[in-house]
Image (cartoon, rainbow, N blue to C red):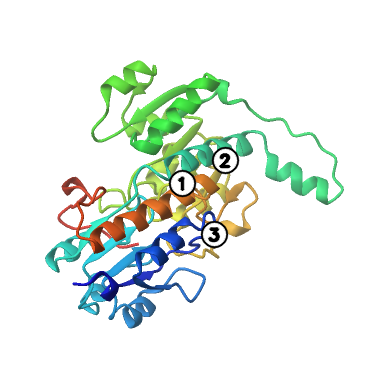
Amino acid sequence: MNQNSWKILVTTVPFGEADPMPLELLKTAGVAFDLNPFGRRFQENELAERIGPYHVLIAGTEPITRAVMERAPNLQHISRVGIGLDSVDLIAARELGIQVSYTPDAPAPAVAELTVAQMLNLLRHLPQADRGMRRGIWKRLMGRRLAECVVGIIGLGRIGKRVARHLSGFGSKILVNDIAPDLEFIEKHGLIEAAKEQIYAESDIITLHVPLTQETRRLIGPRELAMMKPDALLINTARGGIVDEAALAAALRTGKLGGAAVDVFEQEPYTGALTGIENCLLTCHMGSCSVDCRARMEREATEEALRFVRNEPLRSLVPESEYPARRTQS
């Protein structure tokens, strides 16, 4: 197939704002491409209606379900901007002969730093202090230091490891849990391997860094929240659906949990119950939104898409280990 015959749909937003290079790469390659016309995440039906003519998708977090792919007779490659794969039906892609790539390393630094920033904001009550000042209230709020906290990290992958390294500099005691623990890393950084139940019971801060799968959906629900300290803080920069949002809202309202910071939600944009809770810090899925990390994600995904178009070896195909028997859709 002639390179000029390929059509690429870029669904992720923003695109080319942090750095215009991805757009320049597409223009220089001479391929036909279209950008997301909505300026927001595609809904499943919207993507299904538009995807038909395209051969390659440079994708965001929109639901790329079997139903969507079955409406895309020309689709051969999905190049995901980011690390999360819960929005892509990988099994359907494989059965339909569609290759899937992603950018797993690019967002990790930004997500890890946001995670630590959320911890510090909650520990020192910065959102409350800011809101009080704007209402004319001068009140110094007493907080806690990270060095005095036990932090539990659930999921010790690319992002979890970065969070652990950052926290080591603060002097926190760090408990970790992972389905395939890197024992060398744990020993090197003085971490303590622990069961999830121990993390829930003993941690002052619990931070989640696992993918959304059948096994991790509702990983944190009423039972797990009840096991946590009443002044514990819960951080989720991983994926919506890992935390039962209704149960979290109930725990915060009744004082059974000290606070939470949530960057990811089951339905985005989010307008649910957590928006009315004072001690819940909410951000709009912006973990990867540093200029450098966003630019790298877009550039790597675009380069991979163009490698596919040119019939060159792909460098970031999703590994077989990410293809479970069934993967949930967010």
| SS of the residue under disc 3 | loop
Q: Position of residue 32 (x, y in %)?
A: 35, 74
Q: Nearer the viewer, residue 281 or 298?
A: 298
Give the CA separation, mark 2 to mark 3. Answer: 25 Å
Question: Is residue 61 among the parts visible in the rendering?
Answer: no
Pointer 3: residues within 10 angstroms few (<14), some, or many (20+)? some
Give the CA separation, mark 2 to mark 1. Answer: 10 Å
Q: Of callouts 1 and 3, which one flags the residue occurring earlier in the amino acid sequence?
A: 3
Residue 181 found in image quarter: top left
The residue beneath circle 1 is: 237
Residue 17 numbered tag? 3
Looking at numbered disc 1 in the image, what kind of residue is underneath it? Answer: Thr
Q: Nearer the viewer, residue 275 or 110?
A: 110
Q: Of callouts 2 and 3, which one flags the residue occurring earlier in the amino acid sequence?
A: 3
Q: Is residue 180 above or below residue 225?
A: above
| SS of the residue under disc 1 | loop
Residue sticking out furthest to the bottom: 49
The reply to whether discs 2 and 1 touch (Cβ–Cβ < 8 Å) is yes
Q: Of callouts 2 and 1, which one flags the residue occurring earlier in the amino acid sequence?
A: 2
Q: Position of residue 16 (x, y in %)?
A: 50, 60
1 vs 3, front mark: 3
Pointer 1: residues within 10 angstroms few (<14), some, or many (20+)? many
Give the CA separation, mark 1 to mark 3. Answer: 23 Å
Residue 118 numbered tag? 2
